Image (cartoon, rainbow, N blue to C red):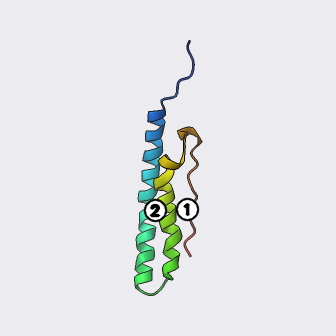
């Protein structure tokens, strides 16, 4: 039978590439927040949501069973 066939390995690879792009694009915000904390200009607790967001991105392959239903988390607001 001819039908639609989805290459799940290829779809997971797309998800990993997108996830890695999002982590890299966000990394500067973590570095900046750490600098502000080191200078005493930001509360250390403000770093937690940023680190949690990156961890949520890293966990996507383990916390999702199907690549076509993955929903990426929203970036946290920086206070």
Q: How many marks?
A: 2
Reading the image, the residue beneath label 1 is 75
The residues bearing labels 2 and 1 have C-alpha atoms spaced at a distance of: 9 Å
Residue, x 54% and y 41% (percent of image)? 65
Is residue 39 found left or right of 53 in the rendered image?
left
State the residue lying farthest toward the bottom: 40
Residue at position x 57%, y 18% in the image: 3
Q: Which residue is mark 2?
A: 26
Task: Point out residue 33 in the picture as x, y percentages from the top left corner.
Answer: 45, 75
The residue located at (53%, 69%) in the rendering is 49
Query: Which quarter of the figure has residue 30?
Result: bottom left
Mark 2 closeness class: few <14, some 14–19, many ≥20 residues within 10 Å: some
Q: Is residue 32 above or below residue 57?
A: below
With 21 as the anchor, is 77 left or right in this view?
right
Point out residue 63 in the picture as x, y percentages from the top left corner. Answer: 53, 49
Viewed as shown, does residue 40 lie left or right of 74? left
- The residue lying toward the viewer, choosing from 2 and 21, is 2
What residue occupies the far top of the structure in this picture? 1
Question: For the N terminus, which image quadrant?
Answer: top right
Residue situated in front as seen by the camera: 32 or 47? 47
**Does residue 78 lie above or below 74 as drawn?**
below
Could you tell which of marks 2 and 1 lies nearer the N-terminus? Answer: 2
């Amino acid at each position: 039978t001819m039908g639609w066939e989805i290459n799940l390995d290829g779809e997971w690879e797309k998800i990993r590439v997108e996830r890695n792009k999002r982590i890299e694009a966000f990394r500067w915000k973590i570095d900046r927040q750490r600098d502000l904390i080191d200078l005493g200009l930001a509360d250390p607790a403000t770093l937690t949501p940023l680190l949690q967001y990156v961890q949520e991105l890293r966990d996507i392959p383990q916390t999702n069973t199907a690549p076509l239903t993955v929903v990426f988390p929203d970036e946290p607001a920086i206070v």
